[in-house]
Image: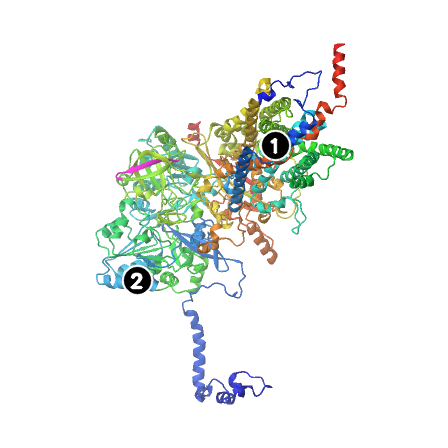
């Protein structure tokens, strides 16, 4: 890894006078196209890919097995009990939805803010978003007691003439996550069209030509196409932007609008959104760093990209840390004895271990990113990012389970213990995630080729004379 | 054939007609077909003869009423006139436990019993009932009941074969006046059983007829003999008592008269009137101790010393022979009693030695209790109770034929008695029982017994009144009652009804109307036993103080759930949380925290109990408030052959709990001195409320909020601030953003629960389970916290673990007007009715469990599995009978909770609409309210100015649980007011 970087210019240096280079190495348009497309065109899958894919599919099958067992037996196969009505499945749901946040944030918000460095990572992040939301959507469906009736949550006109309860945040959840998934999928797909067309054009076999051709929707790269594409992309970005904020706010309403101490908090919407961005970026880092090495994309996904993401992690990590502390402050300041108890119980009660795992992973671990050395050393970033992933799962666990396990009446307090089925189902969802992810790596352009080209120096109309002029000015 | 078809134009009625044969022609000519000869014609009867026949017919027509009524009980194949399908009908009946009748009223629908309640007319229960009565339905429907007679060699046989066998044995033994014949029956006060016993003993003078049970009242009776020279029963009049002392006597729990005692005590707990004061002196917690104003921990062996000290203070002396605290308690108690002479009483527990009972009688005399707070009636004839003697005879081979009727001595007798070994020496043994249990397997014959709800019977209630049982259904299996089998011995093979009626008519003649009244009422209204007056004798209580002493004194109590083990196969009872430990599916050794610390034990640790050569391994439960040096262990667990629920060795189904009989003394004494040794291992105890494994934070949090959840005050404080309960939690004015959508007029259902009256007896819990088809989830799911009870009794200890105060609070759905559960259900499966009920629409529920999360009272229960799976199996068909047809059986994945017994509201509404009479206060009684012996639960219409529930809601003591959440619960609690003795209260502070 370092050998390929050796001798290459360091684009992490902050020099306000120059725009940092976002594509390194001796790359031109053709080499970028080639580098990205080659990954999706490799004649046969590599051995490593095959092993990884087999393992992922096996894990996915285990997930399906768990679901079949669950549906045939009952929710009792999990550890949920009477006070703790929601446990791992909901924790997993919020975890995956949170991960699914980074993609749209990178694609939409950074796009609108003209953060050009997003181009190398947005495709990747968006794909991750889609897959994470798919994993997330598995859980609410199977989580209910009678999954075969889960469709009653949708407002469908059917003979019972019964509408869902629009006062229930769970229903808002259905709309919020559903919309988010739809828009994210569209956004991703629209962005993919020019690149799919590129692969189609390079295709050597008929089947590839037909399949990529089908999904390229007849893209010819005409000016009119580009024009419409840009408009559509902009509109979708504008649509997706509020969704980034809304989806996790609405997920947080599930908790915030209830009257359970520990859930009933007004800080939840921003806190959840910050947490989601935090976890999403951590997951992007976790996946992207190995991928860029494996696929040899260090020139496209540069150290500067990674460093930027580390900075975002550091920032959102501190937001989350702030939320943790302000929760405690409000619990004390409000004078509500039940809320005060809940927070003391979180930090020092039977679930203290989970709370302190959460704090160490989410608040302490990102602090290492103050050091540039760590921000620019890929393996160290992966380690921190994995800690953040773990921490964010525990955050949802702490919120969901510890609050429920001890609420108002001490007679009903109980400790929650997960079952093997809980653990295997969660593990299985990773299988699903990675299966989809590996398919993506194998068949689709993992970097937005057309967009990356747009941020290359060559794309600038005055690229060649500009440099000259600046240099002369400086000399004069 | 051609001849038949020659005339196509005519219709024919038969082949004969068609063929026009001779027979047809003759028929055609005969004016009266069917009468072949003239002799059959009426003309042959003379006028005189005709009138004779006419008269005889008229006379004999009346005679049909003189026959015994036909006993056939048939299913409804066709609807009989005047019956309404599905409508509830009520029949008085009875169950007997420990030789005392519990009068019942059984609801029956379409000829099937459905729900058991107490007989509302009987002064003993007044409609309330015990957990055992409430669980009777499930016992009836137990699919594992024994279904047919069988011999030990495995051959199924019939009753006819048994009769032949019995006749054979009787013929063989009859010659020797019945020598070698023995009958061992369950303890019973049945006059019919007593009559048959006398008849049998008259017929076979050398035979033995023993009536015995592991839980008896021998000490108590012996005590009265010591004090009065007679067998007397004390009837406590708690309504007249201002000072009540319970010396290890569980007046409100295990006492045979617990329902009436609870009610009378609770009526004296209204702080607006003069309140009674209850002292409990006991080793381990009883329901009575939990209700007491003062509780003293005392070793059973010290009971006599304590009472003697009280006596000496009453006589003007000092409390001697006691420790400092005990002496102070005894002196204060004695002074308080003396100040309330004539309105005080002392009750002594059945397991304490006879001397203590006798001394209590003497003290009661001194306090002027007889005739005021205690009445005496003669103890009914109990016959021979010498089980030990019988076993000795059996072992010596003197018994040739033994009949065991309704008892299970192979399990339910002290292991030291070695009943099983003795039984093996009896060549012919017969067991009559509900189950093919331990004794059935050891006897040469087993006969299925008819269940209490399947047979006729009679017994005496605690007050001595005759209570009769009538069957609600024909025996489901080929069962007969104990009296029917005993009657076989006496030589009369007659149905139970005749046997009971014969007994009754011996005292009352053959008055049919009176008999019908008796059956209708279920008991003899004028039949309460005569109040006896007896003269106290001079005696020394020390002569009968055989209380063993040792490092640990162990008290064997009947289990408040499975009694002596006879209800072990009843899932409702096995899963019933113990009133104090909240344990289900187990008994455990109750141990004081100090002892547990010393032996390095915690709840769930295994110990070995040793008494001489006998030993028992069992799990420990560290019980706050247990007297150090004492242990408590409930009987009735660790069954070897009870069934799928209660455990079965032959089917390798582990039994819940530990068999306390294993270390009981041969005499069956309820006290034993034992040695405790720690052994390796740990036993998982399934409690519905965990309290010991609690951390510092949790303990502190609980302490802080306890006073808000369960509000209580001393009488003194109450008198100063009668509305103290309303000022416990300070919160801003509770306002609503919108107008309540509930209509102001119409019904507003609500409930009030008086914490001052609740004794925590659990009757409501089982009553609710029986009424509302609540499933049993099993120990594994209770361990996970998935029990389904719609009403639970929260129990909290307050203060020092060594000597805590106990508070209890029944909690069911509070039917919040502003229900948090309703707002969060995404599919609108839980909605508000216009009468303010928080309704659950089961078939709309998808099971998100969000409602349960948002319920601050945590009363919602989720069907994590299909808990009715076993109903699909054909062998469990009978279990379906235990369900209330008025209540939906919930599917898997559905949330459920207390409905305020909406089905009862609906049926009252229907009745009111049909009759045009408005629903009056008291017409609707929820199942928990109905079962409650102490009248702590009241349900009704809050819009009715005169409704009892309205008055209670307006009472200064009433408060809503967690009202600061602004959920506006419809259930309100009435704060508890303790009435401490100022002298003792001062000491404490």
Q: Chain of mark 1?
A: A
Q: Is residue B447 left or right of residue A378?
A: left
- Number of callouts in the render? 2
Residue B515 % position (x, y) = 42, 62
Where does the image place residue A293, in percent across and percent down from the top left? 58, 26
Element carrying mark 2: helix
Q: Nearer the viewer, residue B158 or A238?
A: A238
Report whether residue A114 is seen.
no
Q: Nearer the viewer, residue A174 or B935?
A: A174
Dominant secondary structure of the residues highlighted in magenta in the image: strand
Given residues B867 and A437, the one toward you in this image is A437
What x and y, as percent, mark residue A51? 53, 35
User: In this rendering, which labeled residue sits more in front, label 2 or label 1?
Assistant: 1
User: Is B905 drawn above or below residue B493 in the view shown?
Assistant: above
State the residue position of label 2.
Answer: B490
Quadrant of the frame with the C terminus of chain B: top left
Q: Which stretch appears magenta?
A: B604-613
| Quadrant of the image occupied by residue B44 | bottom left
Residue pointed to by mark 1: A98
């Amino acid at each position: 890894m370092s050998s390929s970087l050796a001798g290459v210019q360091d684009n992490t240096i902050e020099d306000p006078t120059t725009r940092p280079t976002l594509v390194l190495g001796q790359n031109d348009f053709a080499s970028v196209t080639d580098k990205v497309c080659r990954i999706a065109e490799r004649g046969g899958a590599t051995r490593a890919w095959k092993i990884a894919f087999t393992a992922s599919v096996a894990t996915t099958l285990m997930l399906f097995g768990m679901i079949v067992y669950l549906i045939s037996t009952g929710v009792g196969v999990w550890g949920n009990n009477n006070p703790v009505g929601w446990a791992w499945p909901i924790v997993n749901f919020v975890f995956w939805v949170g991960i699914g946040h980074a993609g749209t944030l990178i694609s939409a918000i950074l796009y609108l803010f003209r953060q050009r460095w997003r181009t190398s990572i947005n495709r990747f992040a968006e794909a991750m978003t889609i897959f994470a939301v798919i994993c997330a959507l598995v859980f609410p469906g199977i989580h209910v007691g009678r999954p075969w009736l889960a469709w009653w949550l949708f407002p469908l006109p059917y003979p019972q003439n019964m509408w869902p309860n629009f006062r229930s945040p769970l229903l808002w959840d259905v709309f919020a996550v559903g919309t988010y998934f739809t828009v994210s999928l569209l956004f991703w797909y629209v962005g993919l069209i020019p690149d799919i067309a590129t692969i189609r054009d390079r295709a050597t076999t008929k089947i590839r030509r037909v399949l990529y051709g089908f999904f390229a929707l007849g893209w010819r790269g005409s000016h009119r196409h580009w024009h419409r594409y840009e408009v559509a992309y902009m509109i979708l970005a504008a649509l997706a932007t509020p969704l980034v904020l809304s989806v996790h706010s609405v997920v947080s309403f599930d908790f915030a609008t209830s009257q359970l101490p520990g859930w009933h908090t007004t800080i939840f919407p921003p806190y959840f959104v910050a947490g989601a961005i935090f976890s999403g970026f951590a997951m992007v880092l976790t996946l992207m760093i190995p991928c860029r090495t494996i696929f040899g994309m260090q020139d496209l996904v540069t150290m500067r990209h990674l460093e930027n993401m580390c900075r975002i992690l550091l920032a959102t990590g501190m937001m989350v840390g702030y939320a943790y502390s302000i929760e405690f402050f409000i619990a004390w300041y409000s004078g509500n004895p039940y809320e005060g108890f809940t927070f003391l119980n979180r930090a020092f009660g039977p679930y203290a271990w989970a709370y302190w795992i959460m704090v160490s992973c989410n608040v302490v671990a990102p602090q290492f990113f103050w050091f540039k050395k760590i921000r620019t050393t890929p393996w160290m970033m992966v380690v921190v990012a994995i800690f953040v992933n773990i921490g964010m799962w525990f955050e949802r666990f702490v919120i969901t389970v510890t609050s429920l396990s001890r609420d108002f009446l001490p007679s009903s307090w109980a400790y929650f213990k997960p079952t093997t089925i809980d653990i295997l189902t969660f593990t299985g969802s990773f299988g699903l995630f990675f299966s989809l992810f590996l398919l993506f790596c194998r068949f689709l352009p993992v970097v937005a080729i057309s967009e990356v080209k747009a941020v290359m120096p060559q794309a600038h109309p005055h690229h060649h004379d500009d440099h000259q002029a600046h240099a002369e000015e400086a000399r004069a | 054939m051609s001849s038949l078809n020659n005339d196509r134009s005519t219709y024919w009625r038969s082949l004969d007609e068609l063929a026009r044969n001779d027979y047809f022609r003759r028929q055609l000519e005969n004016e009266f077909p069917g009468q072949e000869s003239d002799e059959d014609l009426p003309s042959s009867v003379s006028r005189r003869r005709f009138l004779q026949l006419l008269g005889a017919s008229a006379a004999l027509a009346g005679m049909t009423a003189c026959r015994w009524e036909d006993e056939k009980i048939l299913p409804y194949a066709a609807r009989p006139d005047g019956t309404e399908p599905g409508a509830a009908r009520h029949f008085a009946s009875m169950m007997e436990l420990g030789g005392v009748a519990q009068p019942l009223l059984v609801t029956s629908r379409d000829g099937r019993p459905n729900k058991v309640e107490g007989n509302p007319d009987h002064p003993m229960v007044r409609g309330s009932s015990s957990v055992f009565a409430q669980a009777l339905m499930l016992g009836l429907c137990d699919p594992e009941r024994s279904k047919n007679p069988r011999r030990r060699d495995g051959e199924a046989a019939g009753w006819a074969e048994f009769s032949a066998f019995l006749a054979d044995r009787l013929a063989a033994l009859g010659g020797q006046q019945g020598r070698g014949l023995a009958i061992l029956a369950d303890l019973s006060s049945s006059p019919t059983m007593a009559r048959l016993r006398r008849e049998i003993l008259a017929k076979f003078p050398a035979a033995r007829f023993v009536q015995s049970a592991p839980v008896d009242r021998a000490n108590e009776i012996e005590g009265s003999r010591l004090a009065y020279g007679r067998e007397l029963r004390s009837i406590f009049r708690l309504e007249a008592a201002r000072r009540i002392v319970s010396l290890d006597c569980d007046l409100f729990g295990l006492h045979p008269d617990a329902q009436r005692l609870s009610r009378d005590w609770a009526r004296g707990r209204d702080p607006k009137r003069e309140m009674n004061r209850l002292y409990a002196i006991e080793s381990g917690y009883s329901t009575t101790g939990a209700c007491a104003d003062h509780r003293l921990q005392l070793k059973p062996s010290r009971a006599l010393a304590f009472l003697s000290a009280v006596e000496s203070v009453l006589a003007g002396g000092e409390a001697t022979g006691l420790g400092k605290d005990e002496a102070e308690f005894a002196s204060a108690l004695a002074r308080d009693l003396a100040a309330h002479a004539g309105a005080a009483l002392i009750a002594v527990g059945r397991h304490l030695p006879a001397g203590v009972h006798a001394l209590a009688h003497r003290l009661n005399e001194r306090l002027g209790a007889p005739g005021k707070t205690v009445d005496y009636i003669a103890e009914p004839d109990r016959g021979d109770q010498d089980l030990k003697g019988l076993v000795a005879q059996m072992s010596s081979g003197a018994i040739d034929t033994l009949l065991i009727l309704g008892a299970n001595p192979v399990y339910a007798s002290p292991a030291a008695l070695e009943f099983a070994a003795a039984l093996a020496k009896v060549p012919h043994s017969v067991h009559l029982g509900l189950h093919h249990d331990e004794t059935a397997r050891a006897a040469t014959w087993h006969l299925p017994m008819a269940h209490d709800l399947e047979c006729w019977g009679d017994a005496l209630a605690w007050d001595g009144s005759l209570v009769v049982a009538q069957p609600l259904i024909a025996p489901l299996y080929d069962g007969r009652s104990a009296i029917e089998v005993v009657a076989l011995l006496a030589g009369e093979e007659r149905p139970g009804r005749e046997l009971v009626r014969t007994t009754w008519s011996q005292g009352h003649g053959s008055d049919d109307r009176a008999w019908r009244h008796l059956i209708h009422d279920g008991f003899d209204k004028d039949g309460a036993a005569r109040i006896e007056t007896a003269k106290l004798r001079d005696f020394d209580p020390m002569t009968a103080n055989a209380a063993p002493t040792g490092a640990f004194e162990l008290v064997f109590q009947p289990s408040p759930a499975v009694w002596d083990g006879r209800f072990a196969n009843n899932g409702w009872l096995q899963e019933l949380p113990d009133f104090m430990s909240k344990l289900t599916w187990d008994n455990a050794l109750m141990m004081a925290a100090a002892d547990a610390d010393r032996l390095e034990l915690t709840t769930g640790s295994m110990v070995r109990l040793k008494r001489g050569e006998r030993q028992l391994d069992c799990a420990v439960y560290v019980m706050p408030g247990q007297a150090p040096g004492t242990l408590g262990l409930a009987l009735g667990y660790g069954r070897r052959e009870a069934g799928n629920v209660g455990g079965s060795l032959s089917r390798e189904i582990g039994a819940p709990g530990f068999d306390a009989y294993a270390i009981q003394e041969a005499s069956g004494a309820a006290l034993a001195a034992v040695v405790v040794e720690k052994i390796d291992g740990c036993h998982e105890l399934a409690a519905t409320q965990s309290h010991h494994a609690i951390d510092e934070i949790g303990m502190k949090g609980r302490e802080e909020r306890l006073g808000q959840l369960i509000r209580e005050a001393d009488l003194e404080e109450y008198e100063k601030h009668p509305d103290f309960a309303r000022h416990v939690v300070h919160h801003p004015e509770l306002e609503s953003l919108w107008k309540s959508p509930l209509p102001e007029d119409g019904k507003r259902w609500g409930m009030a629960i008086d914490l001052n009256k609740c004794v925590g007896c659990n009757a409501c819990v089982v009553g609710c389970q029986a009424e509302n088809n609540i499933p049993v989830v099993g120990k594994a799911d209770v361990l996970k916290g998935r029990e389904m009870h719609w009403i639970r009794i929260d129990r909290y200890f307050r203060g020092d673990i060594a000597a805590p105060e106990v508070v209890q609070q029944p909690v069911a759905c509070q039917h919040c007007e502003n229900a948090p559960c309703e707002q969060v259900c995404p599919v609108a499966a839980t909605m508000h009715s216009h009468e303010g009920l928080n309704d659950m629409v089961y078939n709309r529920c998808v099971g998100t469990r969000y409602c349960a999360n948002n319920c601050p009272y945590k009363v919602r229960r989720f069907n994590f599995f299909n808990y009715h799976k076993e109903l699909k199996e054909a062998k469990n068909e009978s279990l379906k009978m235990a369900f209330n047809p008025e209540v939906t059986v919930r599917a898997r994945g559905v949330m459920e909770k207390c409905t305020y017994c909406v089905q009862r509201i609906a049926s009252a509404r229907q009745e009111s609409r049909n009759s045009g009479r408005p629903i009056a206060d008291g017409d609707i009684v929820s199942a928990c309210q109905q079962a409650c012996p102490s009248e702590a639960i009241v349900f009704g219409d809050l819009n009715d100015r005169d409704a009892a529930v309205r008055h209670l809601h307006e009472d200064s003591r009433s408060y809503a649980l967690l009202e600061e959440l602004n959920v506006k619960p419809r259930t309100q609690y009435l704060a508890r007011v303790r009435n401490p003795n100022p002298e003792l209260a001062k000491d404490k502070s």
